[in-house]
């Protein structure tokens, strides 16, 4: 009887721990929901002022045809990365819908949590599998392999289908 009770208590503890982790992940996703990351905005010297960064972000929002008043905050998070928060989810959706209008090497993406990054790293060309050829792991799949390795991989996949 005690063994069953101990097992049940252990299961309850594991489930409550899992629920707590899921709750933390959901809170993190909610905080990042109205943010985007802009890639390619180079830092303007060592002493880049906040208004210089704001001007660069304003130019990007003009290309995306968004209102500058929608911007809640912007801060640099890397040499070429800028985190931009918006007041509404609609602004983020419009930015993603119009991101093909961006000029030069500027790109935007969602602000992802660590769990979302892990999920998005699965490559669709290999179904999330990592390929090991000549002792090296190629997580990007066949697209990143040298030509002769691509041919070997295609031959292997063809043999599997038979």
Image (tube, rainbow, N blue to C red):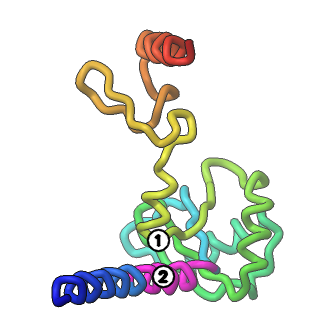
Q: Are marks 2 and 1 in contact (CB under 8 Å)?
A: yes
Pick the front one: 110 or 102 = 110
- The x and y percentages for residue 108 are 62, 60
Location of residue 47 (image quadrant):
bottom left
Q: Residue furthest left?
A: 2
Location of residue 79 (image quadrant):
bottom left
Location of residue 158 (image quadrant):
top right
The magenta region covers 21-33
**Residue occupying the point 54% across, 85% down:** 31
Label 1 sits on residue: 113
**Residue occupying the point 43% across, 71% down:** 77
Majority secondary structure of the magenta segment?
Answer: helix
Pick the front one: 71 or 31 = 31
| Magenta stretch contains residue 30 | yes
Task: Decide if residue 149 is on the left or right side of residue 123.
Answer: left
| Magenta stretch contains residue 36 | no
**Residue occupying the point 51% across, 55% down:** 120
Q: For numbered disc 2, what is the local secondary structure?
A: helix
**Quick one: quadrant of the C terminus?**
top right
- The x and y percentages for residue 81 are 49, 64
- The x and y percentages for residue 128 are 47, 42
Q: Residue furthest front?
A: 1
Pick the front one: 158 or 98 = 158
Q: Vertical placement of 11 versus 95: above or below? A: below
Q: Residue furthest right?
A: 65
Label 2 sits on residue: 28
Task: Decide if residue 1 is on the left or right side of residue 128.
Answer: left
């Amino acid at each position: 009887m005690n063994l069953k009770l101990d097992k049940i208590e252990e299961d309850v503890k594991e489930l409550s721990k899992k629920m707590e982790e899921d709750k933390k992940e959901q809170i993190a996703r909610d905080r990042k929901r109205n943010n985007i990351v802009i890639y390619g905005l180079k830092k303007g010297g060592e002493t880049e002022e906040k208004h210089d960064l704001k001007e660069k972000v304003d130019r990007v929002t003009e290309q995306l045809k968004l209102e500058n008043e929608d911007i809640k905050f912007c801060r640099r998070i890397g040499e070429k990365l800028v985190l931009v928060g918006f007041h509404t989810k609609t602004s983020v959706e419009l930015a993603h819908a119009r991101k093909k209008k961006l000029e030069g090497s500027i790109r935007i993406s969602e602000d992802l949590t660590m769990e979302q990054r892990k999920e998005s790293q699965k490559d669709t060309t290999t179904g999330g599998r990592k390929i090991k050829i000549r002792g090296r792991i190629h997580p990007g799949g066949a697209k990143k392999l040298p030509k002769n390795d691509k041919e070997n991989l295609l031959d292997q996949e063809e043999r599997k289908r038979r």
